[in-house]
């Protein structure tokens, strides 16, 4: 039967069905566009990507986990040494593709995802208040366990670890309103194998315990070029039961409880009055609190100007300062940091020196003209605006011949010259200063005299 012959009731039912199907399609499209499929809840990723085994934003309460003491010993001095595991008390990741969406209740993603999420960064926070103030942090490592790699046999993912510099909440933090971040403290690569990976967090934990930094947690940033290059880690929401129950984020800390709250002291060693452009600067420190010196910061200034950072957080006690400029005054100061994190404040200049990079100058003189004696006096003198003259070298030649050494490394400034041969005698002097800067010989006479001691005599004109 044709359309024209279809009963009116059947035609109306068909129209209603078509309208209902259209409404469902429109709602589904709109729901996907506003990210309905990405909201917190059990949301598997699309089945056409390698991420099908990963579930994002699984709503579950994190199980209660306590701090674990792995080892505890006592030093000969009576100080307690501990190795502990601190569980994360907050974790989340943020995604540039969903800048206003929070991802604080599921696995942790790092790197870059082409599956709409874009760049992904991980935030973690650990409560270290059980570590006594004044403790020396021997080591601290952030440990995360890879659950998945996308692609599965991916090349290593480069990452960086930073402390966070402002508060955040794991159930509210998003890409758009994420916390401030500190400077990079560690680099590490994450391979595709499903195992533990560790970042050195010693300096961050040391700053937390000593009070140098407020503990707002840590930030992991992976390589974020636009490509599928992603790692998925277990989070603190991982259930206790099952084989993955111990794969939650951990901070493994080894410390010695010195109870050292005393600031160390340090000083730059005295420098010579004058130095060459490249010279050695040394310093030393003492810590009476018991924890011991961990590192030093060294600054310098030129001609009384602003202090300039030279060395930061170094354990060595001497270094070569290079590139000093002639005639300029260089001052140095140092501060020490002990292993308990106590930091000495900077004081004033502790050592000073002047750079001398110019050699001295000198000249020789004697009675000019013609003499009939075999002996005569030659003198020389020099000037040096820096370290001062150490010695002189004086040479001579006869009738324009080869130069012959006469006085070598002498501190005298005159001597008697005696010869058995008539002729014209030329003299040239050079000076060497206290730093070993050597005035070059020029080959040009500085003083000349003619000896005519054998008859017939030459009468001076």
Image (tube, grey):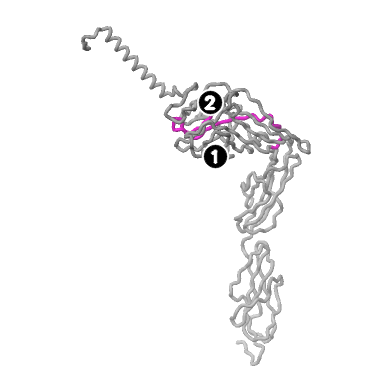
Frontmost residue, 209 versus 372: 209
User: Which mark identifies residue 91?
Assistant: none
Q: Is residue 428 above or below residue 241?
A: below
Extent of the magenta region: 108-136
What residue is at 62 percent from the left and 58 percent from the top? 277
Q: Where's residue 222, x and y in %? A: 52, 36
Q: Where's residue 186, x and y in %? A: 58, 40
Q: Which residue, given by chain and number where applicable, does mark 1 sit on?
A: 189
Q: Which residue, given by chain and number where applicable, does mark 2 sit on?
A: 106
- Give the alpha-carbon distance from disc 2 to disc 1, as whole Å: 23 Å
> Which is more N-terminal, label 1 or label 2?
2
What residue is at 52 percent from the left and 39 percent from the top? 158
Quick check: can you spot residue 164?
no
Give the quadrant of the N terminus: top left
For residue 337, which quarter of the picture? top right
Q: Is residue 340 magenta?
A: no
Crowding near the residue tagged with mark 1, few <14, some 14–19, many ≥20 C-alpha atoms within 10 Å: some
The answer to whether 229 appears left or right of 343 in the picture is: left
Q: Is residue 202 above or below residue 419?
A: above
Q: Is residue 442 above or below residue 171?
A: below
Q: Secondary structure at mark 1?
A: strand
- The number of discs equals 2
Do the CB atoms of the residues marked 2 and 1 lie less than 8 Å apart?
no
Frontmost residue, 372 versus 225: 225
């Amino acid at each position: 039967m044709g359309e024209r012959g279809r009963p009116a009731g059947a035609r109306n039912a068909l129209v209603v069905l078509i309208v209902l199907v259209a409404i469902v399609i429109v709602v589904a499209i709109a729901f996907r566009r506003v990210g309905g499929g990405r909201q917190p809840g059990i949301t598997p990723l699309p089945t056409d990507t390698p991420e099908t085994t990963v579930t994002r934003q699984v709503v579950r309460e994190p199980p209660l986990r306590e701090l674990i003491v792995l080892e505890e010993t006592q030093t000969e001095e009576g100080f307690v040494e501990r190795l502990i595991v601190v569980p994360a008390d907050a974790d989340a990741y943020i995604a540039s593709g969903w800048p206003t969406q929070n991802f604080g209740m599921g696995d942790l993603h790092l790197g870059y995802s082409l599956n709409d999420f874009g760049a992904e960064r991980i935030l973690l926070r650990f409560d270290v208040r059980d570590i006594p103030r004044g403790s020396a942090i021997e080591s601290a490592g952030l440990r995360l366990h890879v659950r998945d790699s996308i692609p599965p046999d991916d090349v290593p993912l480069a990452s960086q670890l930073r402390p966070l510099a402002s508060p955040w909440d794991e159930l509210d933090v998003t890409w758009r309103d994420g916390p401030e971040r500190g400077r990079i403290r560690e680099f590490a690569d994450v391979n595709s194998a499903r195992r533990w990976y560790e970042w050195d967090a010693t300096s961050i934990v040391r700053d937390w315990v000593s009070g140098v930094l407020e503990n707002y947690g840590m930030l992991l940033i992976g390589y974020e070029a636009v490509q599928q290059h992603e790692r998925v880690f277990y989070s603190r929401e991982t259930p206790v039961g099952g084989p993955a129950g111990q794969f939650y984020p951990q901070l493994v800390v080894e410390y010695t409880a010195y109870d050292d709250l005393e600031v160390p002291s340090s000083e730059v060693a005295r420098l010579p009055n004058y130095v060459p452009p490249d010279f050695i600067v040394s310093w030393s420190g003492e810590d009476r609190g018991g924890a011991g010196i961990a590192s030093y910061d060294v600054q310098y200034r030129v001609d009384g100007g602003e202090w300039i950072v030279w060395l930061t957080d170094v354990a060595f006690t001497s270094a070569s300062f290079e590139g000093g400029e002639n005639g300029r005054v260089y001052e140095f100061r140092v501060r020490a940091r002990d292993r308990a994190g106590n930091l000495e404040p900077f004081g004033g200049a502790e050592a000073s020196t002047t750079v001398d990079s110019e050699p001295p100058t000198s000249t020789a003189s004697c009675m000019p003209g013609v003499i009939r004696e075999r002996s005569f006096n030659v003198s020389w003198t020099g000037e040096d605006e820096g370290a001062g003259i150490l010695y002189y070298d004086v040479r001579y030649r006869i009738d324009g011949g080869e130069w012959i050494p006469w006085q070598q490394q002498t501190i005298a400034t005159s001597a008697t010259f005696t010869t058995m041969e008539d002729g014209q005698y030329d003299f040239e002097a050079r000076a060497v200063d206290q730093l070993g800067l050597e005035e070059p010989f020029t080959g040009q006479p500085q003083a000349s005299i003619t000896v005519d001691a054998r008859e017939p005599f030459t009468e001076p004109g």
